[in-house]
Each structure stands twice: as C-alpha cells, then as structure tokens.
C-alpha cells in the first residue's frame, strides 16, 4: 500500500479502542472502580500536552503537521451502463481500529468481502502492522491518521478523507481513553480533560463534520454508531459501582474542563479518572440520541449505540495490578457468565454496521447469553432528552461549531 510522503502528527495521547463493556439489564458485568486501563504510554500523555501549554505561554505557535494516509482506494465493480447505480463495497470508518474491539470489528467487516474499512488511528504504523497481523488484505482497508485528542487532527482527517474521493456509508466511533487510576488530570491539545476531550468531544466534532458525507451516501443503509459502555449506565449493577457517572448541571463542561478556570470534570467536581471515563460514555450515548432526534427523519441515517459485551481479556487492563489481570477473565467466564472475547465483540459491532435487522435508529443494542441482539434500556440520565440537548449545545461551542454547522 502506497504511503504519501507526510509526517506523523505528534500525539498528545495514546488512543485505544473501547474494549469496555456495556451490559444488558438481564446480564450484569463486574467492573470495579480500580479497573485499570489503558494501553497508553503515560509519558506520551504528559509531555506533548504540557509542552504545548508551555510554548503557548511563551508566545510560540505550533504548526500543523500533515498526517500520513494510505491511499489505496477500494475497487468498484460497475454494473451495466443502463443501471442507475454502480455496485460497490460499502465504506466504513472505524476509529481506534489498531487494536482490541476496533481491530476485531475491522477484521470481521473486511472478511465479508463487502466492506472497505478506513482504519482511523493515532498510531499509523501500528495500525498497518495490526491489519497485516490480522490477515486483512491490502485491498480491504485504508489506514488514515486521526488523533481524537486534537481538534486540528480531526479536521485534517476529514479533509484527507474527502480528498481520497471515497464515499462514506458508515461511521463507527469506537476509540477511547480510559484512565481509572489516574490521580491528576491530563489534557488534550485544546486543554480539555483527556477522557472527555477524546472520547466525547473528538468524536462529536468528527461525527458532525462527516454527517454531510453520510447524507450523500447512496448505500442501502447508512449508519452512525457510537460505542457505549455499561459503566455509564446506572440502571445496571456495574453502573452502580462507585464512582457512578453523573453529569450534574454540566458546569465543568461549560467551563471548558481545563482544570484552571473550571473543574476538569463535567459536573464541576474533583478529578476522578474512573468517573471521567464513565461521564464521557454518558455523553456518547446522549449524543447518539440527539443525532437521532435531529437528523434521522430528515436523512434516513441510522444512529445507534451498543454494548458489545464484557471483554475481560483486553489491553484495556494492561496497567492494572497483575492479580486483577489474572482473576478477572475467569471471574467473567465462570461467575458472572458475561465473558465475551474481542473476536466475538467485534462480530457484534460488525452486525450493527451491516445487518439489515439492526437498522432501527435511536437504539442502544445489547446481546443476551444466547448471543441474540436486543434493544436495551439506558439509565435515566443517559436517556434524558433535555440533558442531551444541553450537552450538544455546549459541545458545539467547545469544538468551534456554530449551531447546525458542519
């Protein structure tokens, strides 16, 4: 696969797919407060974001660095000249597709032969190696650089994607940062608390900008999917493990989550890494519903969220204590019976991307113990229409979008 001669965007964060589970009401999943987290190298978080702030204070400006993009374009098989539409593979963007749930989903879709996967990842080379290791052919995917912790990177990704000439049929917002043991907040390039800035605001801007591309799709079923989490749903056992998700009156979000002029937490409270992640997933699920209310009837796009299952063996827990990593998988397999492999979870997310029977919009999908999908219920806060509207409007301001801008 040919690579354009460009530079890798320096990251302020390592971004990882959300291998976290979200659970059905019928099926619970143990997820403790100390469940630890991410595959990221902490020095990457601390150095670049802090240095950016120091440079700004001293009057220096940072230049935009072009991202690398693999330019292979999916093959298009044309039908007879008299046909109204060409027959082609569907194009799906999956964020955080270099590992875990994102990679498993990309592989599952590529193996069908019906999808071309745009793997939107912070670490370009890691994504290429992961795709090769997973057995994905060069023709089945394109790797494009995306750092959700930088709004400039999000906008650049959208520009690069549009220059590729590929249509967009499905967008999967999967990547996430999860730092439950962090004692101090880390910040994105724009100064937002890292978990919410990446998981919610980065995906919010990406989804808003690419909405127009989805509208223009002539594919049979165009969809926007945001991966949810059981940890943000307080109507489940796992969602009630302290600290519980709670957005409060959004005073911290409205203040910019910068930890200087406002709290780094959405509700304005003291920083808590586990709660920051849970709050970000509530925002994800509220955003999905607000997209549905604003755009489904007009565009025909399906907007959905999901809980793919409790993925107990994942890089998500790389920094947790060894004893937890040893005991958590068998606990899920033999006690809660909620264990789901990354491969199985990837197949479930791939179903939400492609299956005709999962086209209902505004739904939070889950799977029961028989691996059958069903419409799950969100908690009171995660389904609060008025709070969804407020989160949407505040998020627009934070990411620099005017109302109804795109």
Image (tube, rainbow, N blue to C red):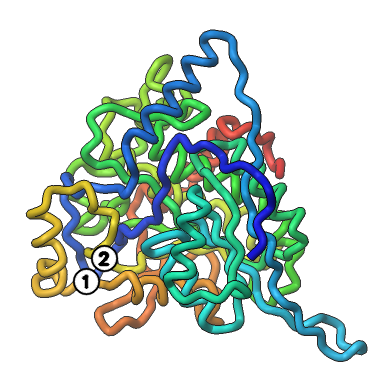
Q: What distance separates the C-alpha of mark 2 from that of mark 1?
A: 5 Å
Mark 2 element type? loop
Q: Which of 14 and 287 is in front in this view?
A: 14
User: In the drawing, does residue 251 fall left or right of residue 173?
Assistant: left
- Residue position for label 1: 339
Q: In this view, does 236 lie above or below 232?
A: below
Q: Do the residues labelled 2 and 1 touch (CB within 8 Å)?
A: yes
User: In the drawing, does residue 202 fall left or right of residue 343?
Assistant: right
Q: Is residue 397 visible?
A: yes
Q: Quadrant of residue 87?
A: bottom right
**Local crowd at mark 2 within 10 Å, few (<14), some, or many (≥20)?**
many
Q: Nearer the viewer, residue 86 or 261?
A: 86
- Residue position for label 2: 310
Q: Where residue 296 sits: x, y (%)?
A: 63, 62
Q: Is residue 295 visible?
A: no
Q: In this view, does 55 lie above or below 309?
A: above
Q: Residue 130 carries which label?
A: none
Q: Which of 181 and 118 is in front in this view?
A: 118
Quadrant holding the C terminus? top right
Instruction: Name which of mark 2 and mark 1 comes first in the sequence.
Output: 2
Image point 28% across, 72% down: which residue?
A: 341
Q: In which quarter of the image is residue 397?
A: top right
Q: Where residue 188 sits: x, y (%)?
A: 46, 32
Q: Which of 295 and 187 is in front in this view?
A: 187
Q: Is residue 271 above or below residue 312?
A: above
**Local crowd at mark 1 within 10 Å, few (<14), some, or many (≥20)?**
many
Q: Where residue 370 sits: x, y (%)?
A: 28, 84
Quadrant holding the N terminus? bottom right
User: In the drawing, does residue 139 fall left or right of residue 199?
Assistant: right
């Amino acid at each position: 696969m040919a690579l354009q001669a460009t530079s890798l965007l320096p990251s302020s964060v390592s971004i990882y797919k959300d291998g976290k589970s979200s659970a059905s009401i019928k099926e619970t999943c143990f997820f403790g407060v100390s469940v630890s987290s991410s595959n990221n190298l902490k020095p990457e978080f601390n150095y670049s974001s802090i240095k950016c702030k120091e440079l700004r204070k001293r009057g220096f400006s940072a230049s935009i660095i072009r991202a690398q993009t693999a330019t292979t374009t999916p093959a298009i098989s044309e039908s007879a000249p008299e046909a109204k539409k060409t027959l082609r593979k569907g194009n799906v963007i999956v964020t955080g597709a270099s590992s875990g749930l994102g990679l498993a989903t990309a592989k599952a879709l590529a193996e069908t032969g019906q999808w071309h996967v745009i793997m939107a990842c912070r670490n370009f080379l890691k994504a290429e190696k992961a795709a090769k290791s997973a057995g994905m052919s060069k023709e089945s995917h394109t790797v494009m650089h995306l750092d959700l912790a930088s709004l400039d990177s999000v906008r650049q990704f959208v520009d690069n994607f549009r220059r590729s000439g590929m249509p967009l049929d499905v967008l999967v917002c999967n990547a996430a940062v999860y730092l439950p043991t962090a004692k101090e907040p880390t910040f994105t390039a724009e100064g937002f608390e890292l978990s919410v800035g990446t998981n919610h605001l980065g995906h919010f801007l990406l989804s808003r900008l690419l909405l127009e591309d989805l509208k223009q799709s002539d594919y049979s079923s165009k969809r926007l999917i945001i991966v949810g989490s059981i940890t943000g749903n307080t109507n489940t056992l796992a969602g009630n493990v302290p600290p519980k998700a709670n957005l409060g009156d959004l005073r911290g979000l409205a203040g910019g989550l910068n930890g200087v002029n406002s709290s780094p937490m959405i509700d304005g409270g003291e920083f808590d890494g586990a709660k920051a992640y849970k709050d970000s997933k509530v925002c994800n699920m509220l955003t999905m519903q607000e997209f549905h209310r604003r755009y489904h009837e007009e565009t025909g796009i399906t907007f959905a969220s999901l809980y793919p299952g409790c993925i107990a063996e994942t890089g998500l827990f790389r920094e947790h204590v060894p004893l937890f990593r040893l005991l958590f998988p068998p606990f899920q397999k033999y006690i809660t019976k909620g264990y789901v492999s990354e491969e199985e979870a990837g197949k479930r997310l791939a179903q939400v991307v492609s299956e005709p029977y999962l086209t209902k919009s505004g739904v939070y999908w889950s799977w029961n113990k028989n691996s059958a999908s069903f419409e799950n219920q969100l908690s009171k806060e995660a389904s609060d229409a008025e709070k969804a509207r407020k989160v949407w409007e505040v998020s627009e301001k934070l990411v620099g979008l005017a109302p109804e801008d795109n």
